[in-house]
Image (tube, rainbow, N blue to C red):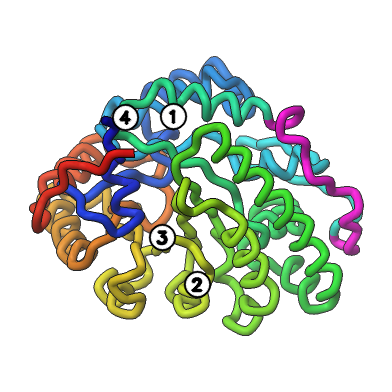
Protein backbone atom coordinates (compact mmCIF):
# COMPACT_ATOMS: atom_id res chain seq x y z
CA UNK A 1 0.00 0.00 0.00
CA UNK A 2 1.42 3.36 -1.04
CA UNK A 3 1.28 6.28 1.36
CA UNK A 4 0.14 9.69 0.17
CA UNK A 5 2.90 12.19 1.05
CA UNK A 6 2.02 14.52 3.93
CA UNK A 7 2.55 17.50 1.62
CA UNK A 8 -0.27 16.28 -0.64
CA UNK A 9 -2.49 15.53 2.33
CA UNK A 10 -1.99 19.08 3.61
CA UNK A 11 -2.89 20.42 0.14
CA UNK A 12 -6.24 18.68 0.60
CA UNK A 13 -6.71 19.79 4.24
CA UNK A 14 -6.39 16.17 5.36
CA UNK A 15 -4.79 15.11 8.67
CA UNK A 16 -0.99 15.06 8.81
CA UNK A 17 1.46 13.68 11.36
CA UNK A 18 3.60 16.83 11.09
CA UNK A 19 3.49 20.11 9.21
CA UNK A 20 5.11 19.65 5.77
CA UNK A 21 7.84 22.05 4.72
CA UNK A 22 9.65 22.99 1.54
CA UNK A 23 11.19 26.30 0.43
CA UNK A 24 10.83 28.24 -2.78
CA UNK A 25 14.17 28.20 -4.66
CA UNK A 26 15.31 25.48 -2.27
CA UNK A 27 17.63 24.15 -4.99
CA UNK A 28 19.97 27.05 -5.58
CA UNK A 29 23.01 29.14 -4.86
CA UNK A 30 22.97 28.90 -1.05
CA UNK A 31 23.88 25.20 -1.39
CA UNK A 32 27.60 24.41 -1.78
CA UNK A 33 26.81 21.34 -3.92
CA UNK A 34 24.82 23.54 -6.29
CA UNK A 35 27.61 26.13 -6.52
CA UNK A 36 30.07 23.36 -7.32
CA UNK A 37 27.95 22.21 -10.26
CA UNK A 38 27.60 25.80 -11.48
CA UNK A 39 31.37 26.10 -11.84
CA UNK A 40 31.12 23.36 -14.47
CA UNK A 41 27.74 23.87 -16.10
CA UNK A 42 25.98 27.08 -17.24
CA UNK A 43 22.53 27.66 -15.76
CA UNK A 44 20.55 26.90 -18.92
CA UNK A 45 22.55 23.73 -19.51
CA UNK A 46 21.58 22.55 -16.04
CA UNK A 47 17.92 23.27 -16.76
CA UNK A 48 17.96 21.54 -20.14
CA UNK A 49 19.91 18.43 -19.16
CA UNK A 50 17.55 16.04 -17.34
CA UNK A 51 20.26 14.29 -15.34
CA UNK A 52 21.58 17.62 -14.04
CA UNK A 53 18.10 18.98 -13.32
CA UNK A 54 17.33 15.82 -11.35
CA UNK A 55 20.57 16.05 -9.40
CA UNK A 56 19.95 19.66 -8.42
CA UNK A 57 16.28 19.05 -7.54
CA UNK A 58 17.29 16.28 -5.15
CA UNK A 59 20.02 18.26 -3.36
CA UNK A 60 17.85 20.04 -0.73
CA UNK A 61 15.68 16.95 -0.20
CA UNK A 62 18.73 14.83 0.58
CA UNK A 63 20.41 17.49 2.72
CA UNK A 64 17.45 18.78 4.77
CA UNK A 65 14.69 16.19 4.52
CA UNK A 66 12.18 18.45 2.74
CA UNK A 67 8.65 17.11 2.34
CA UNK A 68 8.42 18.18 -1.29
CA UNK A 69 10.79 18.63 -4.20
CA UNK A 70 10.16 21.26 -6.85
CA UNK A 71 11.50 20.65 -10.32
CA UNK A 72 14.69 22.59 -11.02
CA UNK A 73 13.90 24.73 -14.04
CA UNK A 74 13.00 28.33 -14.89
CA UNK A 75 9.70 29.98 -15.76
CA UNK A 76 11.26 31.71 -18.78
CA UNK A 77 12.00 28.45 -20.62
CA UNK A 78 8.36 28.40 -21.66
CA UNK A 79 8.76 31.80 -23.32
CA UNK A 80 11.83 30.57 -25.17
CA UNK A 81 9.87 27.58 -26.46
CA UNK A 82 7.16 29.99 -27.66
CA UNK A 83 9.62 31.91 -29.83
CA UNK A 84 11.23 34.51 -27.55
CA UNK A 85 15.00 34.87 -27.32
CA UNK A 86 16.37 34.12 -23.84
CA UNK A 87 19.74 34.45 -22.19
CA UNK A 88 20.99 34.97 -18.66
CA UNK A 89 23.31 37.85 -17.87
CA UNK A 90 25.35 37.27 -14.71
CA UNK A 91 25.04 40.95 -13.80
CA UNK A 92 21.60 41.93 -15.10
CA UNK A 93 19.72 38.66 -14.71
CA UNK A 94 17.46 37.14 -17.39
CA UNK A 95 17.07 38.99 -20.67
CA UNK A 96 14.09 38.28 -22.93
CA UNK A 97 13.57 39.56 -26.47
CA UNK A 98 10.40 39.16 -28.51
CA UNK A 99 10.18 41.24 -31.65
CA UNK A 100 7.18 43.56 -31.83
CA UNK A 101 5.62 42.48 -28.55
CA UNK A 102 5.41 46.04 -27.18
CA UNK A 103 3.37 46.99 -30.23
CA UNK A 104 0.97 44.14 -29.56
CA UNK A 105 2.34 41.68 -32.13
CA UNK A 106 1.51 38.37 -30.45
CA UNK A 107 1.31 36.40 -33.70
CA UNK A 108 5.01 35.55 -33.39
CA UNK A 109 4.35 33.56 -30.22
CA UNK A 110 3.31 29.94 -30.64
CA UNK A 111 2.01 27.33 -28.25
CA UNK A 112 4.98 24.94 -28.05
CA UNK A 113 5.09 21.27 -28.93
CA UNK A 114 5.92 19.80 -25.51
CA UNK A 115 7.45 16.57 -26.79
CA UNK A 116 9.70 18.41 -29.22
CA UNK A 117 10.61 21.68 -27.50
CA UNK A 118 10.29 20.90 -23.78
CA UNK A 119 11.01 17.18 -23.74
CA UNK A 120 13.90 17.77 -21.32
CA UNK A 121 11.45 19.09 -18.69
CA UNK A 122 9.14 16.09 -19.01
CA UNK A 123 12.04 13.66 -18.91
CA UNK A 124 13.37 15.27 -15.73
CA UNK A 125 9.91 14.93 -14.14
CA UNK A 126 9.77 11.23 -15.02
CA UNK A 127 13.26 10.57 -13.66
CA UNK A 128 12.49 12.46 -10.45
CA UNK A 129 9.39 10.40 -9.73
CA UNK A 130 11.58 7.30 -9.91
CA UNK A 131 14.31 8.82 -7.74
CA UNK A 132 12.26 10.44 -4.96
CA UNK A 133 11.17 8.57 -1.83
CA UNK A 134 7.46 7.75 -1.71
CA UNK A 135 6.86 10.23 1.10
CA UNK A 136 8.32 13.20 -0.81
CA UNK A 137 5.99 14.86 -3.32
CA UNK A 138 7.13 16.27 -6.66
CA UNK A 139 5.95 19.77 -7.60
CA UNK A 140 5.87 20.94 -11.20
CA UNK A 141 5.41 24.61 -11.99
CA UNK A 142 5.02 27.41 -14.46
CA UNK A 143 5.03 31.15 -14.45
CA UNK A 144 1.51 32.55 -14.66
CA UNK A 145 0.48 34.48 -17.80
CA UNK A 146 0.70 37.96 -16.30
CA UNK A 147 4.16 37.45 -14.84
CA UNK A 148 5.36 35.92 -18.11
CA UNK A 149 3.89 38.91 -19.95
CA UNK A 150 5.92 41.33 -17.82
CA UNK A 151 9.16 39.61 -18.83
CA UNK A 152 8.19 39.73 -22.50
CA UNK A 153 7.23 43.40 -22.39
CA UNK A 154 9.98 44.67 -20.06
CA UNK A 155 12.68 42.49 -21.60
CA UNK A 156 13.63 41.20 -18.15
CA UNK A 157 13.04 42.19 -14.54
CA UNK A 158 11.75 45.65 -13.63
CA UNK A 159 11.35 47.94 -10.66
CA UNK A 160 8.51 50.06 -12.03
CA UNK A 161 6.84 47.87 -14.71
CA UNK A 162 6.33 51.07 -16.69
CA UNK A 163 6.22 49.35 -20.08
CA UNK A 164 3.82 46.64 -18.87
CA UNK A 165 1.34 49.06 -17.36
CA UNK A 166 1.40 51.53 -20.23
CA UNK A 167 0.87 48.65 -22.68
CA UNK A 168 -2.03 47.37 -20.57
CA UNK A 169 -3.70 50.79 -20.32
CA UNK A 170 -3.09 51.98 -23.88
CA UNK A 171 -3.64 48.69 -25.71
CA UNK A 172 -6.05 46.63 -23.60
CA UNK A 173 -7.24 44.50 -26.54
CA UNK A 174 -3.66 43.57 -27.45
CA UNK A 175 -2.87 42.83 -23.82
CA UNK A 176 -5.86 40.51 -23.61
CA UNK A 177 -4.63 38.81 -26.79
CA UNK A 178 -1.22 38.27 -25.23
CA UNK A 179 -2.77 36.90 -22.03
CA UNK A 180 -4.91 34.51 -24.04
CA UNK A 181 -1.92 33.10 -25.94
CA UNK A 182 0.17 32.76 -22.77
CA UNK A 183 -2.73 31.11 -20.92
CA UNK A 184 -3.06 28.48 -23.61
CA UNK A 185 0.65 27.68 -23.46
CA UNK A 186 0.74 27.56 -19.65
CA UNK A 187 -2.20 25.16 -19.49
CA UNK A 188 -0.66 22.81 -22.06
CA UNK A 189 2.68 22.96 -20.25
CA UNK A 190 1.23 22.13 -16.85
CA UNK A 191 -0.93 19.31 -18.19
CA UNK A 192 2.17 17.79 -19.77
CA UNK A 193 4.03 17.95 -16.46
CA UNK A 194 1.15 16.22 -14.68
CA UNK A 195 1.07 13.50 -17.33
CA UNK A 196 4.82 13.04 -16.87
CA UNK A 197 4.38 12.53 -13.11
CA UNK A 198 4.19 15.88 -11.29
CA UNK A 199 2.04 15.35 -8.17
CA UNK A 200 1.26 19.01 -7.54
CA UNK A 201 1.51 22.22 -9.56
CA UNK A 202 2.58 25.70 -8.46
CA UNK A 203 1.74 28.76 -10.52
CA UNK A 204 4.10 31.66 -9.88
CA UNK A 205 2.33 34.97 -10.55
CA UNK A 206 5.10 36.84 -8.80
CA UNK A 207 4.32 40.29 -10.16
CA UNK A 208 0.49 40.28 -10.10
CA UNK A 209 0.61 42.32 -6.89
CA UNK A 210 1.61 45.41 -8.88
CA UNK A 211 -1.98 45.67 -10.14
CA UNK A 212 -4.99 47.33 -8.56
CA UNK A 213 -7.89 45.01 -7.65
CA UNK A 214 -9.92 46.31 -10.61
CA UNK A 215 -7.08 45.73 -13.08
CA UNK A 216 -6.43 42.31 -11.61
CA UNK A 217 -10.08 41.34 -12.06
CA UNK A 218 -10.07 42.49 -15.68
CA UNK A 219 -6.67 41.44 -16.98
CA UNK A 220 -5.61 38.47 -14.83
CA UNK A 221 -8.44 36.75 -12.98
CA UNK A 222 -10.31 35.28 -16.00
CA UNK A 223 -7.13 33.74 -17.41
CA UNK A 224 -6.09 32.24 -14.09
CA UNK A 225 -9.56 30.78 -13.60
CA UNK A 226 -9.38 29.28 -17.08
CA UNK A 227 -6.02 27.63 -16.43
CA UNK A 228 -6.87 26.35 -12.98
CA UNK A 229 -10.26 25.13 -14.13
CA UNK A 230 -8.59 23.10 -16.87
CA UNK A 231 -6.17 21.24 -14.59
CA UNK A 232 -7.12 17.93 -12.94
CA UNK A 233 -7.05 19.02 -9.29
CA UNK A 234 -7.98 15.49 -8.19
CA UNK A 235 -4.70 14.26 -9.66
CA UNK A 236 -2.44 17.21 -8.82
CA UNK A 237 -3.36 19.93 -6.29
CA UNK A 238 -2.67 23.46 -7.48
CA UNK A 239 -0.84 26.19 -5.56
CA UNK A 240 -0.93 29.86 -6.50
CA UNK A 241 1.77 32.28 -5.33
CA UNK A 242 2.09 36.02 -5.81
CA UNK A 243 4.08 38.74 -4.10
CA UNK A 244 1.73 41.29 -2.59
CA UNK A 245 -1.09 38.77 -2.39
CA UNK A 246 -2.43 40.47 0.73
CA UNK A 247 -3.70 43.37 -1.39
CA UNK A 248 -5.61 40.96 -3.64
CA UNK A 249 -6.56 38.26 -1.15
CA UNK A 250 -10.29 38.38 -1.91
CA UNK A 251 -9.67 38.13 -5.65
CA UNK A 252 -7.17 35.30 -5.22
CA UNK A 253 -9.60 33.39 -3.05
CA UNK A 254 -11.83 33.09 -6.12
CA UNK A 255 -9.06 31.90 -8.46
CA UNK A 256 -9.84 28.22 -8.08
CA UNK A 257 -6.38 27.26 -6.78
CA UNK A 258 -6.38 24.52 -4.20
CA UNK A 259 -3.73 26.23 -2.06
CA UNK A 260 -2.81 29.91 -1.75
CA UNK A 261 0.85 30.80 -1.22
CA UNK A 262 1.32 33.94 0.86
CA UNK A 263 4.20 36.38 1.07
CA UNK A 264 5.38 37.82 4.40
CA UNK A 265 3.45 41.09 4.10
CA UNK A 266 0.35 39.68 5.76
CA UNK A 267 0.04 38.12 9.20
CA UNK A 268 -0.54 34.40 8.74
CA UNK A 269 -3.26 34.29 11.36
CA UNK A 270 -5.10 37.19 9.73
CA UNK A 271 -4.87 35.52 6.32
CA UNK A 272 -6.19 32.21 7.62
CA UNK A 273 -9.04 34.03 9.33
CA UNK A 274 -10.01 35.87 6.13
CA UNK A 275 -9.70 32.81 3.91
CA UNK A 276 -11.46 30.45 6.28
CA UNK A 277 -10.76 26.85 7.34
CA UNK A 278 -11.59 25.36 3.93
CA UNK A 279 -8.70 27.11 2.11
CA UNK A 280 -5.23 25.53 2.55
CA UNK A 281 -2.36 28.00 2.67
CA UNK A 282 1.40 27.92 2.16
CA UNK A 283 3.94 30.34 3.57
CA UNK A 284 4.98 32.81 4.71
CA UNK A 285 8.28 33.43 6.53
CA UNK A 286 10.26 36.45 5.35
CA UNK A 287 13.31 34.91 3.58
CA UNK A 288 15.61 37.32 5.43
CA UNK A 289 14.32 36.05 8.78
CA UNK A 290 16.72 33.16 8.16
CA UNK A 291 19.51 35.60 9.05
CA UNK A 292 18.17 36.01 12.58
CA UNK A 293 20.10 34.59 15.54
CA UNK A 294 19.28 30.93 16.14
CA UNK A 295 16.98 31.35 19.14
CA UNK A 296 15.15 34.28 17.54
CA UNK A 297 14.58 32.27 14.38
CA UNK A 298 13.24 29.33 16.34
CA UNK A 299 10.80 31.61 18.15
CA UNK A 300 9.71 33.20 14.86
CA UNK A 301 9.10 29.79 13.28
CA UNK A 302 7.19 28.59 16.34
CA UNK A 303 4.93 31.65 16.29
CA UNK A 304 4.19 31.15 12.61
CA UNK A 305 3.42 27.47 13.12
CA UNK A 306 0.92 28.24 15.86
CA UNK A 307 -0.91 30.59 13.50
CA UNK A 308 -0.63 28.49 10.36
CA UNK A 309 -1.43 25.10 11.89
CA UNK A 310 -4.42 26.45 13.82
CA UNK A 311 -6.52 24.98 11.01
CA UNK A 312 -5.97 21.94 8.74
CA UNK A 313 -4.29 22.52 5.42
CA UNK A 314 -1.04 24.30 6.22
CA UNK A 315 2.32 24.01 4.44
CA UNK A 316 5.32 25.83 5.85
CA UNK A 317 7.32 27.81 3.32
CA UNK A 318 8.98 31.17 2.82
CA UNK A 319 7.15 34.24 1.57
CA UNK A 320 9.45 34.30 -1.50
CA UNK A 321 12.58 32.50 -2.70
CA UNK A 322 15.45 31.73 -0.34
CA UNK A 323 18.32 34.26 -0.46
CA UNK A 324 21.60 32.98 -1.99
CA UNK A 325 23.59 33.95 1.13
CA UNK A 326 21.32 32.12 3.58
CA UNK A 327 23.29 30.18 6.24
CA UNK A 328 22.82 26.42 5.96
CA UNK A 329 22.49 26.19 9.75
CA UNK A 330 19.38 28.36 9.61
CA UNK A 331 17.72 26.04 7.11
CA UNK A 332 18.53 23.01 9.28
CA UNK A 333 17.03 24.79 12.29
CA UNK A 334 13.95 25.82 10.35
CA UNK A 335 13.20 22.30 9.07
CA UNK A 336 13.86 20.76 12.48
CA UNK A 337 11.57 23.31 14.13
CA UNK A 338 8.75 22.64 11.68
CA UNK A 339 9.05 18.86 11.88
CA UNK A 340 9.13 18.85 15.69
CA UNK A 341 6.06 21.08 16.05
CA UNK A 342 3.26 19.12 17.75
CA UNK A 343 0.21 18.61 15.55
CA UNK A 344 -3.12 17.73 17.10
CA UNK A 345 -3.93 14.12 16.14
CA UNK A 346 -1.88 11.90 13.87
CA UNK A 347 -2.29 10.44 10.42
CA UNK A 348 -1.04 7.05 9.38
CA UNK A 349 -1.36 8.03 5.74
CA UNK A 350 -3.92 7.40 3.04
CA UNK A 351 -3.58 4.74 0.39
CA UNK A 352 -3.51 5.74 -3.26
- In the rendered view, would you say 153 is above or below 311? above
The kind of secondary structure the magenta stretch mainly shows is loop
In the rendered structure, which segment of residues is drawn in magenta?
A: 102-118
- Label 3 belongs to which residue? 259
- Asked if the magenta segment contains residue 112, the reply would be yes
3D distance between C-alphas at marks 4 and 2: 31 Å
SS of the residue under disc 3: strand
- Residue 81 placement: quadrant: top right
Tell me: 183 left or right of 108.
left
3D distance between C-alphas at marks 4 and 3: 22 Å
Q: Earlier in the sequence, mark 4 or mark 1?
A: 1
3D distance between C-alphas at marks 1 and 3: 22 Å
3D distance between C-alphas at marks 4 and 1: 15 Å
Can you tell which of label 2 and label 1 is closer to the viewer? 2
- Label 4 belongs to which residue? 134
Q: Earlier in the sequence, mark 3 or mark 2?
A: 2
Count numbered badges in the picture. 4
SS of the residue under disc 4: loop
- Label 1 belongs to which residue? 57
Would residue 92 be visible to someone looking at this image? no
- Label 2 belongs to which residue? 252
Image quadrant for the C terminus?
A: top left
3D distance between C-alphas at marks 3 and 2: 10 Å
- Residue 270 placement: quadrant: bottom left
Q: Residues within 10 Å of mark 2 (few under 14, many from 20)?
A: many
- In the rendered view, would you say 104 is above or below 57? below
Can you tell which of label 4 and label 3 is closer to the viewer? 4
Amino acid sequence: MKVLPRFLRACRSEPVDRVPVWLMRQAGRYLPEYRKLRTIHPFLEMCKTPALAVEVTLQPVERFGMDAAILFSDILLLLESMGAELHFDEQRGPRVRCEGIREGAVHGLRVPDMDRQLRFVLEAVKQLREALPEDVALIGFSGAPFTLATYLIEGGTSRTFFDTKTFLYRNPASFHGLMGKLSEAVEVYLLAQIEAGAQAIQLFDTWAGILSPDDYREFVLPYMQRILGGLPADRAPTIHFSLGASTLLDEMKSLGAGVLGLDWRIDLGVARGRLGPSKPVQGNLDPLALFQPRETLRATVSTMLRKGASMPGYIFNLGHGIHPQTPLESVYDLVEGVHSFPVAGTAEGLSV
